[in-house]
Amino acid sequence: MGRSERREGELPPGQRLQRGWPVTHYGPVPRFREDRWEFRVFGATADGGRGWNHQEFSALPYSTVIADFHCVTKFSMLGIEWGGVSTCTVAKLAPPADGVTHVMVWAEYGYSSNLPIEDFLDDKSIFATHESGQPLTAEHGFPVRLVVPRRYAWKGPKWVRGVEYMTADRRGFWEERGYHNLGDPWTEQRYSYQEAPGDGPELQA
């Protein structure tokens, strides 16, 4: 199924409908320390980047989107209400420089995930702080997780701490460990062995 044939509320190939929200992540749940928490935008910025503490980030304009959630482990949740700060809001306040093609989203413990800039700036991509009107739990990414509905959910890390603007693609944590560099659920881009030429940087041996 091509991108133009996607339908909101439908399951991508190989997915099953999930009732409830399973907890899946790599490593322990980090302890939130408000006095040490900072969200940073850095890298190839237009104006030197920017940072917000938790209080400042929480005061940014609040948005909601209704979007589906597709996990590479083959479960999907449909029509979820996500609340938080739009990625476009962050990019407006801390704009990328000319020539930026990708972002690396950084999270606790050095976890990272790469995205093309157009996926990052999609109108449904959001730094979620709430799900279905309730604050995220620690297990699901409190205080902030990225949600990118057009990609498998690993592309939206939990416990996000910052965004790096990049002028060339670079693989993130799971992309270096055998997951597909792009992660489109509608074409089942699950693993790196499925990649076509041009789908991402060469994997290092």
Image: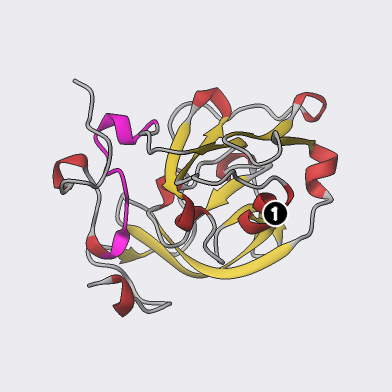
Work out which quarter of the rendered image holds the C terminus and state it: top left
Q: Residue at x 70, y 33 (%)?
A: 48
**Amino acid identity at mark 1:** Lys
Q: Residue at x 61, y 69 (%)?
A: 65
Magenta segment includes 180 = yes
- Few, some or many residues within 10 Å of mark 1 (<14, 14–19, 20+): few
Q: Image check: 55 left or right of 32?
A: right
Q: Residue at x 70, y 45 (%)?
A: 94
**Magenta segment, which residues?**
173-186
Quadrant of residue 8 in the image? bottom left
Residue 87, relative to residue 99: is it above or below? below
Q: Secondary structure at mark 1?
A: helix
Residue extending farthest to the front is: 98
Front residue of 20/152: it is 152
Q: Image check: 111 left or right of 75?
A: right
Residue 123, relative to residue 181: is it above or below? below
Magenta segment includes 93 = no
Q: Residue at x 55, y 46 (%)?
A: 98
Residue 16 point in image, percent of width and height? 30, 65
Residue 87, relative to residue 33: is it above or below? below
Q: Please give the residue where the numbered disc 1 appears in the rendered image.
A: 92
How many marks on residues? Answer: 1
Residue 82 point in image, percent of width and height? 62, 62
